[in-house]
Image (tube, grey):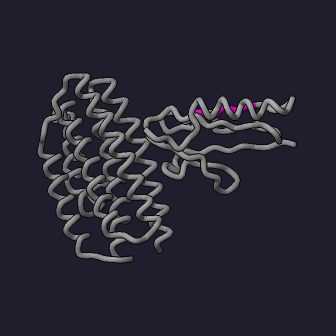
Amino acid sequence: MRRALAGPTVGALLLALAAGSARAEVIEIKAEKLVFAPAQVSAHVGDTIVWVNADFVAHTATARNGAWDCKLHPNMIGKITVAE
Amino acid sequence: MMFIRVAGMAGALAALFVAGSASAQGAKPTDPQIAHIAYTAGQIDIEAAEQALKKSKNKEVVAFAKDMVRDHKAVNEKALSLVKKLKVTPEDNDISKSLSQQAAQKRAELAKLNGDAFDKAYVANEVAYHKTVNGALENTLIPSATNPELKDLLSTGLKIFQGHEQHAEQVAADLK
């Protein structure tokens, strides 16, 4: 099944790219049973956010009003707070 | 009693809701009936979306209809493999029959509309239909299901369809 969100392979690629910066962290957000977990994320500039879809339907992470939601299921919401 | 107020296809599920209230007297739908109702409800929304894909030229409406086809097919495939695994044969029943009948009526009604009028009527019906099905899932089908895997799939389905309801509301607001 086609999935809109990054799977494990894409996740690994982003990890390799992120390894360039010493401080950079990779933060994984799982979409499972129509819930983003964690839904509240604190990140630093340079960090990489990876969304992994564990559901059997496609999801998106679409920016909306300073947060994100799934365009297809707007009951799925989350927010990233970025610190310098 | 919210179901009574929702027009059109809601009638059959209003009947289901009444059947649900009668459950104290033991009139709960069985797992094979629940599986049949849930599958039929999904199939109806796929057919509604296919009609929209033929008739609509609105980008947002077409995208929404494609989302409905993809998600409801995915849920129904899951449901089919689950009933196979559980060796449950979905059982046709009055609720399923009445749902299909009213869906056919709605399709005929929508077939007469074109352009903006069709788009608005299709999306308004999507809001009402998901609201009704979600209410039936929440209040009757999920509580009545006895098999835990069936209950689990219905619960995931409910969250997916609650997402559709909100998505349909957004599309409806954009069409105004």
- Could you say where residue B40 lies in the image, as x and y percent from the top left? 22, 45
* A29 within the magenta span: yes
- Could you say where residue B151 lies in the image, as x and y percent from the top left? 33, 30
Q: How many marks?
A: 0
Quarter residue A81 falls in: top right
Residue pictured at 43% horizontal, 48% vertical: B162
Along the horizontal axis of the image, is B48 left or right of A76? left
Question: Above or below — where is B4 with respect to A8?
Answer: below
- Could you say where residue B114 lies in the image, as x and y percent from the top left? 31, 77
Looking at the picture, tell me which residue is in the foreground, B140 or A2.
Answer: A2
- Could you say where residue B143 lies in the image, as x and y percent from the top left? 31, 33
The reply to whether residue A61 is in sight is yes
Residue pictured at 28% horizontal, 76% vertical: B113
Instruction: Give the dominant element type of the magenta stretch: helix, strand or loop.
Output: strand
Along the horizontal axis of the image, is A76 left or right of A11? left
Question: Above or below — where is B19 with respect to B107?
Answer: above
Along the horizontal axis of the image, is A12 left or right of A2? right
The reply to whether residue B1 is in sight is no
Quarter residue B82 falls in: top left
**Over which residues does the magenta segment extend?**
A26-30
Residue pictured at 25% horizontal, 48% vertical: B43
* B17 within the magenta span: no
Quarter residue A23 falls in: top right
Along the horizontal axis of the image, is A35 left or right of B36? right
